[in-house]
Image (cartoon, helix red, strand yellow):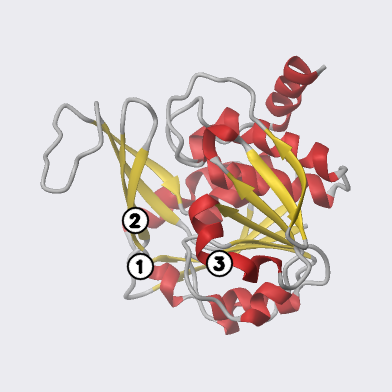
């Protein structure tokens, strides 16, 4: 069982011909609403890739909560750790997506900010995944309770306690986040994954590159959710004891597939899709 401690949002997505520059209005966009939040995305991604998953998180006591949790519930994620908090709104992400798949995101965290370390108490945690769209103290409490593999996605980049980094088996960052954290990523012996978008990703141990992989070529529709899919896939593969280069290949393939459909959670691939594209690309 993987316990994901993280954020739950409703994504409100405007897809248009281009992203606006500061002060610019872009029109002729299409509007859609999808369940999202990095914690929820990674929980559903791991579930679709074959893991048993429980989510610890928080939503508001409002009309958006049911919509935000809909695909998680339908996908078989255990939601017994999700709280509905009176006086808080469900988290919302406002997302602009351009024709080439690039995006801009503004997050209104709402109830996600109300999740506290005490909310982790009482949950038996084996393997754990966490993201920084909730408080670092809550992530630390979950990581300290975990008895197995601890995967942390250090996004969005922010100062975190060294004790949290020291608990990690795997740290996942993109290039911008890797530059922000610098040598701290490699100070505690964790495996470090740095994703580079269309250029793939690399794995590091003690600051030394041990694997690098480019993704398969796909038709990019929307990159929202690709990073969450990569993180979940890499975590699942490593928990399954795949060799590290194979786990990285699995993760970049899953991330590429997530780019072929719009939306975060609607785009998350099933295990059979990833395995099929792996065979088509590398065998």
Compared to residue 220, the image places residue 14 above or below, namely below
62 or 41: nearer the viewer: 41
Alpha carbon separation for disc pair 2 and 3: 26 Å
Instruction: Tell me the mark number nearer the camera, choosing from 1 and 3.
Output: 3
Quarter-of-image position of residue 54: bottom right
Instruction: Report whether residue 69 is seen.
Output: yes
Alpha carbon separation for disc pair 1 and 2: 7 Å
* CB-based contact (under 8 Å), mark 1 and mark 2: yes
Instruction: Report whether residue 141 is seen.
Output: no
Secondary structure of residue under mark 3: helix
Q: Which mark is residue 92?
A: 2
Secondary structure of residue under mark 1: helix
39 or 194: nearer the viewer: 194
Q: Which mark is residue 110?
A: 1
Where is residue 252? Give x, y as percent: 66, 35
* 186 relative position to 139: left or right: right
Q: Which mark is residue 181?
A: 3
* 276 relative position to 160: left or right: right
* 51 relative position to 214: left or right: right
Marked residue nearer the N-terminal end (1 or 2) = 2
Marked residue nearer the N-terminal end (1 or 3) = 1
Instruction: Tell me the mark number nearer the camera, choosing from 2 and 3.
Output: 3
Q: Quadrant of the C terminus?
A: top right
Marked residue nearer the N-terminal end (2 or 3) = 2
């Amino acid at each position: 069982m993987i316990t994901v401690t993280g954020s739950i949002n409703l994504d409100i997505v405007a897809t248009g011909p281009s992203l606006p520059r500061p002060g610019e209005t872009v029109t002729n966009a299409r509007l859609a609403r999808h369940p999202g939040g990095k914690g929820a995305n990674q929980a559903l991604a791991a579930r679709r890739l074959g893991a048993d998953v429980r989510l610890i998180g928080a939503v508001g006591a409002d009309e958006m909560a049911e919509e935000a949790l809909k695909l998680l519930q339908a996908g078989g994620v255990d939601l017994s750790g999700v709280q509905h908090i009176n006086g808080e709104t469900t988290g919302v992400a406002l997302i602009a997506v351009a024709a080439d798949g690039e995006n801009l995101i503004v997050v209104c965290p709402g109830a996600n900010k109300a999740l506290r370390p005490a909310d982790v108490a009482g949950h038996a945690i084996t393997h754990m995944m966490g993201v920084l769209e909730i408080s670092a103290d809550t992530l630390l409490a979950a990581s300290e309770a975990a008895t197995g593999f601890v995967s942390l996605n250090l996004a969005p980049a922010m100062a975190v306690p060294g004790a949290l980094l020291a608990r990690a088996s795997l740290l996942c960052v993109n290039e911008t986040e890797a530059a922000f954290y610098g040598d701290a990523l490699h100070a505690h012996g964790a495996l470090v994954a740095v994703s580079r978008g269309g250029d793939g990703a690399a794995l590091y141990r003690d600051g030394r590159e041990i694997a690098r992989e480019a993704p398969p070529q796909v038709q990019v529709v929307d990159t929202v959710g690709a990073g969450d899919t990569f993180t979940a896939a890499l975590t699942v593969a490593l928990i399954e004891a795949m060799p590290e280069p194979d786990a990285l290949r699995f993760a970049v393939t899953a991330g590429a597939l997530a780019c072929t459909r719009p939306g975060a959670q609607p785009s998350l691939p099933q295990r059979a899709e990833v395995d099929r594209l792996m065979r088509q690309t590398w065998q």
